[in-house]
């Protein structure tokens, strides 16, 4: 998968050099390009924002630097094909569809993702409209709260998507039993020692009875989900 990110804070993404995603980049499973929006400004102050038409608080990101950045990434002509992949452009925004594990699963099948990180009060609407004339565009929210900009949201999305790409997580079985994969929260985990500071590992996990262990874990998932996220139980069959 090829991932491009446009941001005014490229160094935010330096951490993608480390951990599993860093390894995936070294091995070529994930190719990453981070682009500084300010490289597409032409004034002394490298200005990316301006006051909103119609008034109101805060600043809006100007369309011209975004236009140039996307010309470079998508090709200048509407519909121009780039590098054989049909890119999906994602703008993190509290006004977007909420990102879930299902979103991550769907996006893990894409060949090319381009993320545009907005800051301030947002990006001039014409940027979305123009990009939508030559690529698929999605606004995606991390949840019902407001961040200062899209960078943290993009980091979270890349981590959630990246780990679902075959070869990124060493043991693919570890993806199967985690939270949200069967619509439930994950069961509690324990490791050695069996007794620690007066707290015992549940005896069923020491029993060697795989059926009983699976049943206990499923019951724990249900109990935890009922208590913490009852909304998830309304969404499916368990
Ligand atoms: N930018 C600001 N807030 C955001 C959110 N909740 N999700 C995605 N991008 C954002």
Image (cartoon, grey):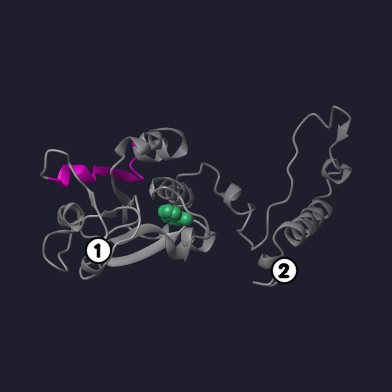
User: Is 30 in the magenta?
Assistant: yes
User: Residue at position x 47%, y 48% from top?
Assistant: 156
Task: Name the residue carrying label 2.
Answer: 238
Residue 76 x %, y %: 11, 60
User: Residue at position x 44%, y 50% from top?
Assistant: 153
Considering the image in quadrants, where does the C terminus appear?
A: bottom right
Q: Residues within 10 Å of mark 1 (few under 14, many from 20)?
A: few
User: Residue at position x 82%, y 44% from top?
Assistant: 205
Residue 175 x %, y %: 57, 51
> Over which residues does the magenta segment extend?
26-41
Quarter of image, res 17: top left
Report if the beta carbon of the residue with label 1 is closer than 8 angstroms to ligand 1. no
Q: Residues within 10 Å of mark 2 (few under 14, many from 20)?
A: few
Q: Could you give the CA–CA distance between mark 1 and mark 2, rounded to whole angstroms?
A: 51 Å
Regarding ligand 1, which quadrant of the image does it lie in? bottom left
Element under label 1? loop
Which of 180 and 142 lies nearest the eye of the viewer? 142
Element under label 2? loop
Task: Name the residue carrying label 1.
Answer: 53
User: Is 104 in the magenta?
Assistant: no
In the rendered structure, the answer to whether residue 219 lies left or right of residue 19 reads: right
Which of 11 and 54 lies nearest the eye of the viewer? 54
Quarter of image, res 25: top left
Mark positioned earlier in the residue sequence (1 or 2): 1
């Amino acid at each position: 998968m090829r991932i491009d990110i446009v941001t005014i804070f490229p160094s935010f993404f330096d951490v993608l050099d480390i951990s599993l995603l860093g390894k995936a980049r070294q091995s070529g499973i994930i190719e990453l390009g981070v682009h500084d929006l300010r490289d597409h400004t032409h004034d002394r102050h490298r200005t990316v924002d301006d006051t909103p038409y119609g008034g109101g608080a805060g600043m809006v990101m100007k369309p011209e630097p975004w236009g140039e950045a996307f010309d470079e990434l998508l090709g200048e002509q509407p519909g121009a094909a780039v590098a054989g992949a049909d890119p999906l452009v994602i703008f993190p925004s509290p006004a977007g569809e909420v990102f879930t594990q299902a979103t991550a699963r769907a996006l893990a099948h894409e060949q090319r993702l381009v993320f545009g990180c907005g800051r301030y009060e947002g990006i001039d609407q014409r940027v979305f409209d123009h990009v939508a004339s030559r690529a698929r565009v999605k606004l995606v929210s991390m949840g019902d709260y407001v961040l200062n900009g899209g960078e943290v949201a993009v980091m979270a999305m890349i981590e959630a998507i990246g780990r679902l790409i075959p070869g990124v997580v060493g043991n693919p079985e570890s993806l199967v039993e985690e939270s949200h994969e069967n619509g439930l929260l994950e069961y509690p985990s324990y490791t050695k020692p069996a007794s620690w500071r007066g707290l015992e590992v549940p005896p069923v996990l020491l029993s060697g009875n795989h059926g009983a262990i699976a049943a206990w874990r499923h019951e724990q998932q249900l109990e935890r989900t009922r208590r913490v996220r009852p909304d998830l139980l309304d969404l499916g069959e368990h």
